[in-house]
Image (spheres, rainbow, N blue to C red):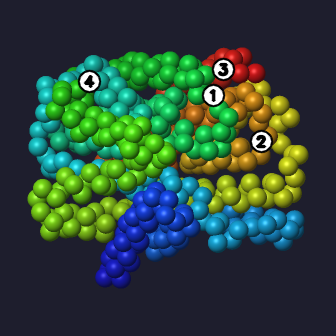
């Protein structure tokens, strides 16, 4: 027992050091991605036996496949492999999730009654969806924790509340320029035309909110289900955080992405908000967070890191074996885009995070011109659907770790929603392909 506690505490310290090293790298003084990757991977190794069996199996398979592909690419095709840097994939996403976890240290904790008038029924569900969606377009995953904690102060979260949180955030992937999915997609296809994405993605996201409200009203008695109050006091922290993100993005640190800003801003605000109680109190809260909450993120961190290694291995092997001239599709048009969407969305049902399918697909396509925008929308819509229904998505893993809901229960409750959103997304893919090709 003592050995387990010591191991988990050490892993928590390494994860914190990884976050601090990543933040230090934002100054541009020196590249830190390699050091961050080592710290996080060692932490995952220490926590390996504590990761739930299914998540451990998936992360292990992805890691083994990534390493195997690199070995094959080097041994059979003579590919140049940067072995020391092979663990860097998705480090920026993993450290953002670590930074977001510090949102729990901001503001008053406990079971105080949430401010603002009580909202219940379908209107409350819609308000929850709207609050999470629009704040989540800027603050990403941290919004779910902020709004979820507000609702949980009255009573443990119910299924309709959890579904509103899940769908409100996941649908933001359809159009938000500041969402984590957009950061990944832009890195894969820099030639994407955002205006065309938003033209189709934003209306589709609004349909998600309407569908959520109508479906939950039909399935559940919402009479006593609390919604997120949009009273000024309820919005003070999330709106304040969103304003700070915009301040840094447009004026103070315009060279940094939204994901990078969130990575350092939320932990920084957590420290400042606790300093009012004194340095000793602040250090105690950070210590408690480091040795309890950070090791609890082992499933999310291992998944993103393993997916990053798989992507590096696959792209290296494909480039070495097929050369620059090979591509999965000679032309990436409507039908190819629809098939790609279905493949990524269906893979989420078996537990693969959409980032895996998106990254793998990008590594075996040769996209030109408007095809990049079409691919981007396929990736974003598959991400929106896949993260809502996928039991091992970052959203559902966070809801599971924070509020104790089963990821597979969330998958079951989201199946109808995912099916309808998939049909709408396929129609949107057909529409956007006309615009860009």
Q: Is residue 146 left or right of residue 252?
A: left
Residue plotted at (37% across, 29% down): 134
Pointer 3 and pointer 2: residues touching (CB < 8 Å)? no
Residue hosting label 1: 193
Marker count (numbered): 4
Q: Secondary structure at mark 4?
A: helix
Residue hosting label 4: 124
Between 218 and 334, the one lying in front of the other is 334
Disc marking residue 365: 2
Residue plotted at (54% across, 64% down): 31
Q: Secondary structure at mark 2?
A: loop
Residue 219 visible (yes or no)? no
Residue plotted at (21% across, 55% down): 272
Q: Where does the image place residue 354, in percent across and percent down from the top left? A: 58, 43
Q: Secondary structure at mark 1?
A: loop
Mark 2 or mark 1: whose residue is earlier in sequence: 1
**In the image, which is nearer the foreground, mark 4 or mark 1?**
1
Location of the C terminus by quadrant is top right
* Depicted 404 relative to depicted 435: above or below: below
Mark 1 or mark 3: whose residue is earlier in sequence: 1
Q: Is residue 280 left or right of residue 294?
A: left
Q: Where does the image place residue 88, in percent across and percent down from the top left? A: 59, 62
């Amino acid at each position: 027992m003592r050995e387990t506690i010591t191991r988990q505490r050490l892993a928590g310290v390494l994860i914190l050091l990884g976050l601090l090293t990543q933040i230090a790298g934002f100054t541009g003084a020196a590249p830190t991605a390699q050091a961050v990757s080592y710290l996080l991977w060692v932490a995952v190794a220490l926590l390996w036996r504590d990761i739930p069996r299914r998540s451990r199996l998936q992360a292990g398979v992805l890691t083994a496949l990534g390493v195997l592909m690199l070995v094959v690419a080097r041994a059979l095709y003579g590919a140049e492999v940067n072995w020391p840097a092979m663990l860097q994939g998705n480090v920026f996403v993993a450290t953002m999730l670590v930074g977001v976890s510090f949102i729990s240290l901001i503001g008053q904790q406990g079971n105080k009654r949430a401010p603002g008038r009580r909202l219940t029924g379908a209107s409350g569900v819609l308000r929850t969806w709207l609050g999470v969606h629009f704040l989540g377009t800027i603050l990403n995953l941290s919004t779910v924790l902020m709004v979820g904690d507000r609702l949980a102060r009255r009573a443990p979260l119910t299924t309709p509340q959890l579904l509103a949180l899940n769908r409100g955030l996941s649908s933001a992937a359809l159009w938000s320029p500041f969402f984590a999915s957009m950061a990944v997609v832009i890195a894969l296809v820099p030639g994407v035309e955002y205006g065309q994405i938003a033209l189709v993605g934003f209306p589709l996201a609004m349909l998600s909110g309407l569908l959520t409200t109508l479906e939950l009203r039909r399935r559940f008695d919402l009479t006593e289900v609390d919604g997120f109050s949009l009273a000024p006091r309820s919005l003070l922290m999330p709106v304040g955080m969103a304003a700070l993100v915009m301040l840094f993005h447009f004026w103070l640190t315009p060279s940094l992405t939204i994901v990078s800003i969130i990575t350092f801003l939320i932990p920084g605000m957590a420290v400042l908000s606790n300093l009012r109680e004194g340095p000793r109190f602040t250090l105690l809260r950070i210590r408690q967070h480091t040795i309890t909450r950070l090791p609890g993120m082992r499933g999310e961190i291992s998944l993103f890191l393993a997916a990053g290694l798989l992507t590096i291995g696959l792209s290296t092997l494909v480039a070495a074996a097929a050369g620059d001239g090979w591509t999965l599709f000679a032309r990436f048009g409507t039908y190819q885009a629809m098939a790609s969407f279905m493949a990524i969305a269906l893979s989420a049902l078996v537990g693969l995070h959409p980032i895996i399918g998106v990254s793998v697909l990008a590594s075996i396509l040769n996209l030109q011109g408007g095809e990049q925008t079409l691919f981007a929308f396929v990736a974003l819509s598959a991400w929106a659907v896949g993260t809502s229904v996928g039991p091992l998505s970052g959203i559902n893993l966070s809801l599971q770790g924070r509020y104790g809901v089963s990821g597979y229960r969330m998958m079951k409750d989201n199946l109808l929603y995912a099916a309808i959103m998939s049909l709408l997304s396929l129609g949107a893919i057909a529409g956007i392909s006309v615009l860009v090709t």
